Image (cartoon, grey):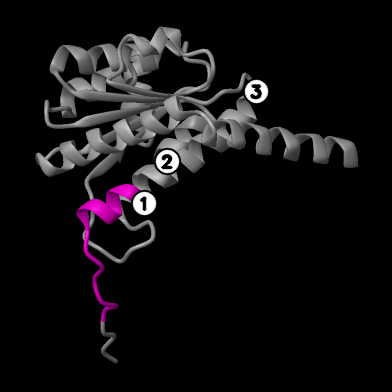
Amino acid sequence: MKQYITDNIAQHIDTISEIAETPEIIGAIQAAAKLIIASLHGGGKIMLAGNGGSAADAQHIAAEFINRFNMRREALPAIALTTDTSVLTSIANDRVFDKIFSRQIEALGTPADTFIAFTTSGNSVNIIEALAECRRRGITTIALAGAKCLNVAQYCDAIIPVPSYKTPRIQEAHIMISHILCGIIERELCTEQPEPQIVI
């Protein structure tokens, strides 16, 4: 058990260290941040989606944008396309599961928006469908992926590949990278607001 624990910690450290030491990945994070900032400056919103644990990541980061990350500041518009069970199940039931995100983008997306996809495999058909729909509508696209990202790469304005084939290590890195993006965007777009006065 101790060996399993230390092996997993070592894998995590190795993955994060490789990201830090790879200029192309650092550059991809910078490019993604600039795209999100431009979208928000232009009156757009951030749409996010993923499957399984990546769905939870999409919801997590949408909450960081809307509420706060490090700063007390104005809300930033974001929506996780993974949260409305009535919409998700109606699309999956009446159409196909592959369309659960692209149909929402068809309804909600505008050319000012940015779509962020979380995909550890790079092969999720519903994510590829969503990215393709964004392309048709002129919506900016960003993907956080793993080492295998060829299928989604062709649809993305920016792609951030985590240099790992292990799903847990990829997901751990996705949260770190997403938090970095949130921090950059807050620093660039927002001003710190004072703590609200509580009147009793």
Q: Secondary structure at mark 3?
A: loop
Q: Position of residue 164 (x, y in %)?
A: 61, 22
- Label 1 and label 2: CA atoms lie apart by 9 Å
Q: Position of residue 81 (x, y in %)?
A: 33, 31
Q: Position of residue 171 (x, y in %)?
A: 55, 32
Does residue 103 sit above or below 184 in this rendering? above
Give the camera-side residue of 129 and 155: 155
- Marks 3 and 2 close (CB-CB < 8 Å): no
Mark before the other along the chain sequence, 3 or 2: 3
- Label 1 and label 3: CA atoms lie apart by 26 Å
The magenta-colored residue range is: 184-196
Disc 2 residue type (three-letter): Ser
Q: Secondary structure at mark 1?
A: helix
Q: Residues within 10 Å of mark 1 (few under 14, many from 20)?
A: some
Does residue 54 sit above or below 194 in this rendering? above
Residue position for label 2: 178
Quarter of the image for residue 13 reads top right
Disc 1 residue type (three-letter): Gly
- Label 3 and label 2: CA atoms lie apart by 18 Å
Residue position for label 3: 166
- Marks 1 and 3 close (CB-CB < 8 Å): no
Q: Residues within 10 Å of mark 2 (few under 14, many from 20)?
A: some
Mark before the other along the chain sequence, 1 or 2: 2
Is residue 173 left or right of 88 when viewed as pictured?
Answer: right
Circle count: 3
Does residue 101 sit above or below 96 in this rendering? below
- Image point 28% across, 33% down: which residue? 47
Residue position for label 1: 183
